Every structure is written in structure tokens, then in C-alpha cells.
Amino acid sequence: MDLSQLNDDQRATLKQFREAVKDCKLPDSDDVYLLRWLVARDFDLAKSEKMLRNSMEWRQKNRIDTIIEDWKAPEVLTKYCAVGHTSADKYKSYTVVVRYGAMDLKGLLLSVKKKGYLTHVTKIVEQCIVEARNNPARFTSSPTTISQAALILDMAGFSMRHITYKPALDTAMQMLQMNEANYPEFLRRVFVINAPKIYSILYSLSKPFMHEKTRNKVRIYGHDADQWKAALLEDFDPQELPACYGGTLTDPDGNPNCITMVNMGGEVPKCYYRTSKLDATNKNCLTISSGSKEQLEFQVTQAGDILKWDFHSEGGDIAFAIYRKEDSQLIPVVPHERVDCHVSSEEGEIHCDGTGVYVVEFDNSFSYFRSKNIWYAITIDSSIPVRQNDK
């Protein structure tokens, strides 16, 4: 929105808003900045003021005003957190690319604490805002217009591991809520590309935390590259769009993936992992002999219930899977995969689409000589989606 588009009532509300928050230490004090908060809350003065004050408190608590100078990202984030800036679209929106499907979120969160990861992402957002402010001719259509960003969210490589590893899912939801609460009208458009069918699970989990205005900006495309490239080129001039996404922008050496702007993610080497003490408090113990497996059955009585797990092992890694019983068959729900739960606890959860018996399997059949002790806590909780109230 542009200040010139405001009607008389909206101009009066903006004037009242400025007066109401004149005691706040704002990162930007012009009318365009204040307009963001009013637009986000449909010019409801009380809601806009509450949202802004909550955000200013968050900024002070987390020292956001100096985060660009203060935060020094650990090497694992600079190498494997696939988030970066490429260019500007036809609307002069600052363009951010996130190769979410290519990121090893579990590896990142085993290497840095959640707060460190969130701080890193927040710094990137703050850098976007500062660069747009310092380059208005490139990133703002006019001095009276709200500057915004276009987000390309590449889901190529996205799988159940992005959903079932609970710390990663929790971090994604917290990051979404953080951005919604503190960066109103930051996004102009979100292009989700290469989205597999299971992406709908993540989107369904995200929707309760997204304001309707944000949801209306999201465009989701599957693996039909011709379709999403055409959609991107409606908003981008070819020279402003990475060649891998249908444009002509490349690295100086001609790389179409523009890896000097956005890295390619990839599996995080275990040498970056933090060491942590494994806690067996309130966990059951199960010994699995070499070359064997154990299965635990859990009855789900209501569709939508959440099956949660938290386990670690002694003696080495273990293979883990969850199935749903249908007659005499076991239908995979969480794919069979070896996990390094002897390094750190494996946590996760799934929403059970149907009732019946769910089978949790710990498989040590690959180990010919070594038994494993598994310390586990598995629960089934009911789920009632709760939308966060406007702040």
C-alpha cells in the first residue's frame, strides 16, 4: 500500500497511531513504517498498537537493533543454511530464496541451538530491510510505498524427515510466528515451488499461525517446472531471476544455481554436531539384541490424535519406523530409517489420520554383533488446532 492511497479516515487513524506510539523507540519512524502495522491489522488502532508494542518489546529483549553487528554465524549455518538474497522483482520487491527441501534441518539443529538458528534467520531478515532502505531506487517503487519482499521457497528434496523431526518442525512454526508478529507486510508474494504432495501436511500445520493476509499471498506449485517458471517470469525480469528458476541470472562462473548468493544446503557433516548428555528420565528401557527388532503397538481411538516419540540409544544407532496396521498388513507412516540417536535424542510427532493400531519399530537387524539399549517415551495426545490471537 502507498500513503497516497489512504482515505481521510485512514489518514486520521495514522495520525492517531503516531501519537499513541510516540513513546516507543522505533527502528524507523517514518509514516511508511507505521503504515505497515495498520495495514496488518486492517487499521484497527488498538490491535495495531498492541502488535507494535509487543514487537518493540521483542526487539529489545533479543537485541534486534544490533543483531547485524553482533551476530556472528557459526560456519555450519553459513555453509548449510540455504537462505539468501538474489535480486528484485518487477515490483521492486527484495527477493529472498530459501531452498528449504535441500536443507538438513535436523543436522543444523544438532549443530546449533534453536535460538542460534532463529537468530541467524532474523539477521537475514534485518539485512533485507536495511539493504532495501539503503537502496530505495532498486527496492522501493516510491518513497511513500511500503517496501516488501518476494520469497521463493524451493521444496525440492522435501520429505517426511522435515516433518517428523519435532525440533525442526517446532523451529519452523516458531519462525513463522516470529515473522508474522514482528515483520508486518514484509512479504508481497510467496512462491512455493517443487512442492511434493506431503508438503500439504506442513502447510496445514502452518496455516493456524498465518494471518489471512499472509495466506492470500502464497502460491503453491508442484514439480511442473514449466508452470512455476512461467508464474515466476510474470513477476521477474529474466535477468533478475536465477537461471535454475527460469531466468538468466547466474554466478560469475556461469553457475545457474547462483550458489554465491544462496548455498545449496545439503547434509550437515557430523563433525559439526554438538555433544549432549542423553537423559533417561521418565523413559522406558528396551534391549534389542543384535540382528533383531522390536515392535510396540499403540491404539489410536480418534483421528487427528498426535503420536509423539522421544528416544535415544546406547551402543550405537538404530533403525526407526512407524506403521499403521490394516488387517494383516503394516502400512508405512514414518519411513524406515537409521537414526543417530546415540548422539542426541530423536524427537518427533505425527498426526494420525485414522484410528487403529500404530506400530513403532526399533530395528537392530543390521547389527550382527552389538545389542542396543533404547530409552524411549511414546505418547498419544489429542489435537485441537489453536490459532494464535492477533497481537
Image (spheres, rainbow, N blue to C red):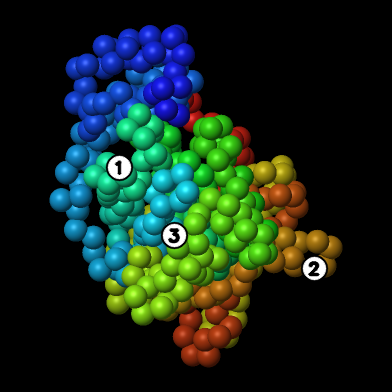
- Residue 26 versus residue 356 in the image, above or below: above
Residue sitting at 38 percent across and 32 percent down? 145
Q: Residue furthest bottom?
A: 368
User: How many residues crowd mark 3 within 10 Å: few (<14), some (14–19), many (20+)?
Assistant: some
Q: CA distance from mark 2 to mark 3?
A: 52 Å
Residue to which mark 3 is pinned: 240
Which mark's residue is nearer the viewer, 2 or 3?
Answer: 3
For mark 1, what is the residue? 136
- The spot of residue 199 in percent (x, y) is 61, 55
Q: Amino acid at mark 3?
A: Glu
Q: Amino acid at mark 1?
A: Pro
- Rendered residue at 72%/60% (across/down): 324
Task: Give how far apart the Cα atoms at labels 3 and 1 are.
Answer: 17 Å
* Structural crowding at the residue carrying mark 1, measured as other residues with C-alpha within 10 Å and reported as few (<14), some (14–19) or many (≥20): some
Visible in this render: residue 264? no
Q: Quadrant of the N terminus?
A: top left
SS at mark 2? strand
Q: Nearer the viewer, residue 172 or 10?
A: 10
Q: Quadrant of the C terminus?
A: top left
| Residue 382, horizontal then vertical, whole percent | 61, 40
Q: Is residue 87 left or right of residue 237?
A: left
Tell me what residue is drawn at x 36 percent, y 41 percent.
140
Label 2, on which residue?
A: 329
Q: Earlier in the sequence, mark 2 or mark 3?
A: 3
Q: Is residue 279 left or right of residue 285?
A: left
* Identity of the residue drawn at 55% across and 79% down: 364
Count of numbered tags: 3
| Secondary structure of the residue carrying numbered label 1 | helix
Image position of 199 with respect to 255: above or below: above
Residue 240 in the image, given as x and y percentages of width and height: 44, 59
Residue 239 bears which disc, if any? none
Marked residue nearer the N-terminal end (3 or 1)? 1
